[in-house]
């Protein structure tokens, strides 16, 4: 016998075993392999609905939306058979908050789901369920593959299956309609937490030397490679979309199924995810219209829809397509369905955005885009965008940006990320897509600025924005029923908005009203009066006598803001007082809020440079507190 023959026999045997085991694996099905359920009846009564959600990508990297974007043939093919939405927005620029809005159809700042991530899960609004539950009650087979990341209690009956193997193919009857939600993870922020070694071994499809950098980025090999690498992730998204469409086609369900492709928020290059700029909020959205259900849409395939839609609208839209009544507790409006007119959607020109806590990092920012104008309002303007968030700074580009700032190697535009924020910003995003030129201080735009400021206040009041409660108070007093709490504090919120608008005045105009609230306001009014005063910086020193006394207040959050003011405006070293507060309170959320201030002073002011982190010993802790401590001691 030829001596090579036994080896060949063993090789063939091994291949046979591998193929046999591969075939037995229930998780593996060839894309074009038809399944038994492909014999669905010819006239299904309601359509299937599929949500294909990619992690962490704005519309800016796809050529369907931006001429310099990556070619996306599969998604473009969807657009040719459907509708491209040119103005689709997440209401928040981070996962758990955005996904909580998607699944509930509610604005997270109204329902207490606005903090990423939850310290405590909040209940669903009274009488409201997550929208797949309504589909399931109507006979749909509901599946999620696989990310949830909700800040609300899910409740029973939402999913028939939710796992990384969940599929519409597992339903028992071919005639059962399905709702399937699937998330593509390979574009997530974590995929950009690569090492320097990867830069020497991986060659992106686009040469890093040729990519267009945003004007506020430093031009370095790391920023160029990160941008090029992210563009490859966009290509992976498109391949995944194409594979899923082929599966639906192989099962005979493509022309029975509305397929939504969209990003779960913007990102993920530095200054995008987590921030209310267009790169953090403006997402790609394409909906493929199935031939068997074109009667549910009064738009021709291949057209664009320019009306504004946002994540509060997605749940109502899914219910509308299924012919299910939309619960009154939802904040959004359907943009597709038998009763929806495209001309009405085309007329929509407004969207709201919000950013609050991200992991251990606190800030509070709101935005309103109306038409081509974007208004951004910062309620803690002294905190720079660059304030430490451990997860963000795992990205080489992020950390390099900070090191270059420390070394004085950034120009004024690139350094803006590390500076205090204006209280108000106004951008013409059609003329200025990177939101570089702030129009807020230009006299000719004063009427537009006032209009959008007033409109934002109207929306915040109408939706009972709970972000004006320190999170410690939200957890202590409102967590059992945030919506009801919000209704009850409506009149208080009106006063808080009035106080915060003092930050848009000159200090000469604001001083008297601020003094009034410091002397006679409620604890929450004092909290915000101090915060507004801090926004004026050293100009607000005349209020130091009154605010300094509030460092002994019974309300720990008033104490925190008073310590913060004395450091910012009166230049009184705040570190010892902050550590006393951190080590003394029994509320871990108060600890976390105070640690945010301590990190701000250590990293962005002359104070705290010699801080002995070993003296920071809170008796109350949680996961986010642990992250802050790890950063302070250098083990993060």
Image (spheres, helix red, strand yellow):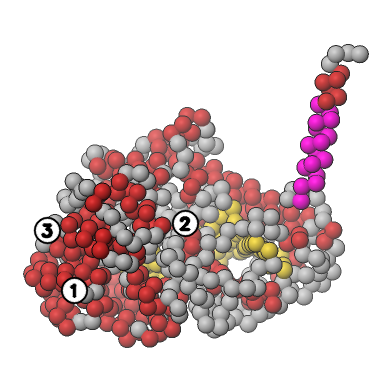
Q: Main secondary structure of the magenta part?
A: helix
Q: Quadrant of residue 250?
A: bottom right
Image quadrant occupied by the N terminus: top right
User: Is residue 140 visible in this depiction of the protein?
Assistant: yes
Q: Residue at x 67, y 51 (%)?
A: 242
Q: Is 20 a magenta residue?
A: yes
User: Tag 3, which secondary structure?
Assistant: loop
> Quick check: marks 2 and 3 in contact, CB under 8 Å?
no
Q: Residue at x 47, y 44 (%)?
A: 192
User: Is residue 66 visible in this depiction of the protein?
Assistant: no
Dot 3: few (<14), some (14–19), or many (≥20) neighbours within 10 Å?
some
> Quick check: marks 2 and 1 in contact, CB under 8 Å?
no
User: Tag 2, which secondary structure?
Assistant: loop
Disc 3/disc 1 C-alpha distance (Å): 20 Å
* Viewer-nearest of discs 3 and 1: 1
* Residue 571 - label: 3
**x, y percent for residue 493:** 32, 81
Disc 2/disc 1 C-alpha distance (Å): 41 Å
Q: Residue furthest top?
A: 2
Q: Which residue is under mark 2?
A: 266
Q: Residue at x 43, y 83 (%)?
A: 484
Q: Which residue is under mark 1?
A: 553
Q: Is residue 603 above or below residue 348?
A: above
Dot 1: few (<14), some (14–19), or many (≥20) neighbours within 10 Å?
some
Q: Is residue 453 above or below residue 430?
A: below
**Image: magenta residue range:** 11-26
């Amino acid at each position: 016998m030829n001596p090579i023959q036994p080896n060949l026999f063993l090789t063939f045997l091994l291949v046979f075993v591998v193929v046999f085991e591969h075939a037995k694996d229930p998780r593996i099905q060839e894309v074009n392999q038809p399944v038994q359920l492909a014999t669905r009846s010819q006239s299904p009564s309601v359509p299937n609905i599929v949500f294909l959600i990619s992690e962490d990508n704005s519309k800016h990297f796809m050529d369907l939306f931006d001429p310099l974007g990556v070619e996306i043939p599969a998604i473009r093919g969807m657009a040719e058979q459907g509708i491209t939405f040119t103005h689709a927005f997440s209401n928040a620029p981070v996962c758990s908050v955005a996904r909580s809005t998607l699944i509930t159809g509610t604005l997270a700042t109204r329902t207490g789901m606005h903090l990423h991530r939850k310290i405590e899960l909040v209940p669903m609004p009274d009488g409201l369920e997550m929208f797949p539950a309504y589909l399931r009650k109507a006979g749909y087979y509901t599946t999620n593959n696989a990310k949830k990341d909700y800040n609300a209690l899910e409740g029973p009956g939402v999913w028939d299956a939710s796992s990384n193997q969940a599929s519409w193919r597992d339903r028992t009857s071919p005639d059962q309609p399905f709702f399937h939600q699937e998330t593509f993870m390979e574009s997530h922020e974590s995929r950009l937490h690569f090492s320097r070694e990867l830069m020497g071994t991986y060659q992106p499809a686009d040469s890093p030397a040729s990519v267009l950098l945003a004007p506020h980025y430093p031009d370095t090999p790391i920023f160029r490679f990160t941008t090029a690498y992210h563009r490859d992730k966009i290509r992976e998204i498109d391949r995944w979309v194409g594979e899923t469409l082929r599966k639906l086609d192989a099962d005979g369900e493509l022309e029975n199924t509305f397929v939504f492709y969209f990003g779960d928020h913007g990102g993920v290059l530095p200054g995008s995810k987590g921030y209310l700029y267009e790169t953090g909020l403006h997402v790609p959205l394409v909906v493929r219209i199935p031939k068997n259900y074109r009667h549910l849409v009064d738009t021709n395939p291949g057209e664009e829809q320019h009306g504004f839609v946002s994540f509060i609208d997605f749940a109502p839209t899914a219910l509308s397509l299924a012919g299910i009544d939309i619960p009154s507790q939802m904040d959004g409006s359907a943009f597709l369905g038998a009763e929806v007119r495209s001309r009405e959607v085309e007329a929509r020109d407004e969207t709201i955005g919000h950013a609050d806590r991200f992991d251990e990092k606190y800030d509070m920012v709101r935005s309103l885009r109306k038409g081509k104008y974007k208004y951004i309002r910062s309620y803690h303007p002294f905190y720079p965008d660059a304030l430490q968030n451990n997860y963000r700074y795992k990205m080489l580009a992020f950390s390099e940006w900070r090191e270059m700032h420390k070394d004085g190697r950034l120009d004024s535009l690139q350094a803006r990320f590390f500076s205090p924020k204006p209280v108000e910003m106004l951008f013409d995003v059609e003329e200025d897509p990177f939101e570089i030129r702030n129009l807020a201080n230009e006299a000719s735009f004063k009427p537009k600025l006032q209009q959008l400021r007033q409109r934002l206040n109207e929306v915040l009041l109408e939706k009972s924005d709970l972000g004006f409660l320190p999170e410690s108070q939200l957890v202590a007093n409102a967590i059992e029923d945030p919506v009801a709490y919000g209704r009850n504090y409506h009149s208080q919120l009106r006063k808080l908005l009035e106080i915060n608008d003092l930050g848009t005045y000159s200090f000469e105009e604001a001083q008297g009203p601020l003094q009034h609230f410091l002397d006679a306001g409620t604890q929450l009014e004092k909290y915000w009066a101090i915060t507004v005063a801090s926004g004026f910086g050293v100009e607000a020193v005349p209020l130091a006598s009154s605010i300094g006394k509030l460092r002994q207040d019974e309300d720990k959050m008033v104490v925190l803001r008073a310590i913060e003011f004395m450091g910012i405006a009166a230049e009184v070293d705040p570190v010892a007082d902050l550590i006393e507060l951190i080590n003394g309170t029994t509320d871990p959320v108060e600890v976390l809020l105070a640690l945010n201030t301590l990190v701000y002073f250590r990293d962005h002011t002359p104070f705290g440079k010699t801080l002995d982190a070993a003296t920071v010993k809170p008796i109350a802790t949680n996961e986010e507190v642990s992250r802050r401590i790890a950063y302070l001691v250098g083990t993060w």
